[in-house]
Amino acid sequence: MLFSYFHQLRGGWRGVVGLVLLLLLLLFWQFAFIQFHFICSFFFFPPCVCVCACLIIIIIIIIINIPVLFLFIPARYIYIYMFVSFYIDVHVFYFPFLFFFATVMMTDGASNYYYYYYYYYYFYH
């Protein structure tokens, strides 16, 4: 049903291709953030590194979304796509980012997290 809707939306298979690209993009960045979570957990990167990595990933997402926006989504539905894209970005980027800090605080405790942060800062700077 979803594929037929996107097929009618664009007037051909371009809408289906746009949907598949959007789903692959969502899946790819979800796995990227899972890896990002484990890397930060094991190597104890400071929060500034995590924030910079999140900003870089969001900029890459915006650059990738531009051709999808103009090639596969008709002009009258761009505002719907922008709302869905914003919804996906919030749930894929910001919630796992907050989940990372929550799991670090719950597993290691706040004092241990700051101990690791200062340990990293002391020995590697």
Image: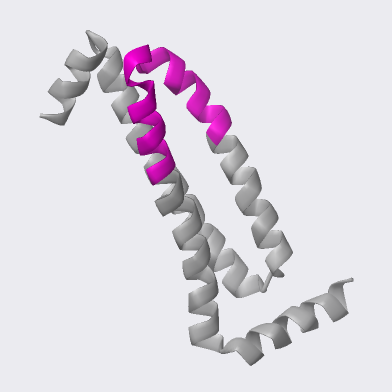
Q: Residue 109: give x, y in percent of width and height.
A: 56, 89
Q: Residue 105: give x, y in percent of width and height.
A: 54, 83
Q: What residue is at 60 percent from the left and 73 percent from the top?
A: 42
Report the number of discs: 0
User: Is residue 90 or residue 64 the one in the foreground?
Assistant: 90
- For the question of whether residue 21 can be seen, the reply is no
Q: What residue is at 41 percent from the left and 31 percent from the top?
A: 82
| 7 to 32, vertically: above or below | above
- For the question of whether residue 103 can be seen, the reply is yes
**Residue with the most extreme top position:** 11
Name which quarter of the figure residue 83 lies in: top left
In magenta segment, residue 30: no
Name which quarter of the figure residue 111 lies in: bottom right
| 69 to 22, vertically: above or below | above
Query: In screen coordinates, is 64 left or right of 7?
Result: right
Q: Residue 41: give x, y in percent of width and height.
A: 58, 73
In magenta segment, residue 77: yes
Query: In screen coordinates, is 103 left or right of 88?
Result: right
Q: What residue is at 57 percent from the left and 43 percent from the top?
A: 58
- Magenta stretch prevailing secondary structure: helix
Range of residues picked out in magenta? 62-87
Q: What residue is at 73 percent from the left and 63 percent from the top?
A: 48
Q: Residue 19: give x, y in percent of width and height.
A: 30, 28
Quadrant location of the C terminus in the rendered image: bottom right
| 97 to 120, vertically: above or below | above
Quadrant location of the N terminus in the rendered image: top left
Query: In screen coordinates, is 84 left or right of 6?
Result: right
